[in-house]
Amino acid sequence: MKLSPHTAPAEPEDLLIRMHNLFGAAVDVTGRPYGDTSRWVCHGCGAHSEFPDTDILAFTRMKANAHAGECRAAYHRLEE
């Protein structure tokens, strides 16, 4: 069995920004650059945008960056 962090998951088509948390897990901001259609998700701990799950990019980026700067999780998938 090997443990491997999700530091470079597949990039979604609507990926706008990819940052990394303190352990290298990806924190993705996805959506569109204009309007209130962007959201974020942490591939380390699974945290994501709060309801209503969309916001304007400037606020989404700020929230994702704050999370990435504090998150120490690195989700590991157990492979058999």
Image: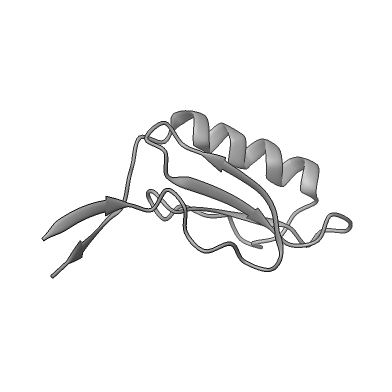
Using the image as rendered, state which of residue 9 and residue 28 is in the foreground: 9
Left-right relation of 15 to 74:
right
Query: x, y percentage for residue 72?
Result: 35, 35
Comparing 53 with 3, the one in front is: 3
Q: Is residue 72 above or below residue 12?
A: above
Where is residue 39? Give x, y as percent: 66, 57
Residue 79: % across, % down: 19, 66
Q: Left or right: where does residue 28 sit relative to residue 72?
A: right
Q: Residue at x 60, y 35 (%)?
A: 65
Q: Quadrant of the N terminus?
A: bottom left
Q: For the point 42% across and 48% down, which residue is it?
A: 7
| 13 in relation to 58, above or below | below
Q: Identify the residue at horizontal 73%, vertical 57% (top origin).
A: 38
Tell how many labels: 0
Residue 42's place in the image compared with 68, above or below, is: below
Residue 23 percent across, percent down from the top left: 37, 35
